Image (cartoon, rainbow, N blue to C red):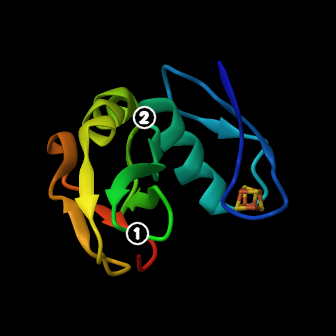
Amino acid sequence: MKEFICTVCPRGCHLKVDENTLAVTGNSCARGVEYGRNEAVNPMRTLTSTIAIEGGIHRRLPVRTDRPIPKSKIFECMEIIHQCKEKSPVKAGQVIVENIAGTGANLIATRNM
Ligand code: SF4
């Protein structure tokens, strides 16, 4: 049995997911079932971080993935992010790394700099 707190809404239901049957209990609505099953099988997260930038008003540029990526890919993505370096100007939403670590997600800037 795996336990999670549902983060789909502020209510924060305490979910229990049976690893064999993927039966979910503790949810107050159907969205918790989907969340619990996804967390048990393939948890996903939007990755946020910063990269080095030259010529900007700050030395680091905030970035994030444009969609959630598998948690198992986060360290691989962070290794790529550590090697990234951009030059100003950069626009919010600009793609920094396409299809980062083969996740299908792009790493994008989250502000102009
Ligand atoms: S199970 Fe439903 S009510 Fe409970 S936190 Fe998740 S989305 Fe909200």
Q: Position of residue 16 (x, y in %)?
A: 71, 31
Q: Nearer the viewer, mark 2 or mark 1?
A: 1
Image quadrant of residue 82? top left
Q: Earlier in the sequence, mark 2 or mark 1?
A: 1
Q: Position of residue 99 (x, y in %)?
A: 16, 53
Taking the spot 25% from the left edge, 46% from the top edge, the residue there is 84
Work out which quarter of the rendered image holds the C terminus and state it. bottom left
Separation of marks 2 and 1 at Cα, in angstroms: 31 Å
Amino acid of disc 1: Gly
93 or 58: nearer the viewer: 58
Question: Which residue lies under the disc numbered 1?
Answer: 56
Question: Which residue lies under the disc numbered 2?
Answer: 71
Horizontal relation, residue 51 to residue 6: left or right: left
Q: Which mark, residue 95? A: none
Question: Relative to residue 64, is residue 77 depicted above or below?
Answer: above
Taking the spot 81% from the left edge, 63% from the top edge, the residue there is 10
Question: Relative to residue 97, is residue 44 depicted above or below?
Answer: above
Q: Are marks 2 and 1 in contact (CB under 8 Å)?
A: no
Q: Answer whether residue 106 is visible to the viewer in this image.
A: no
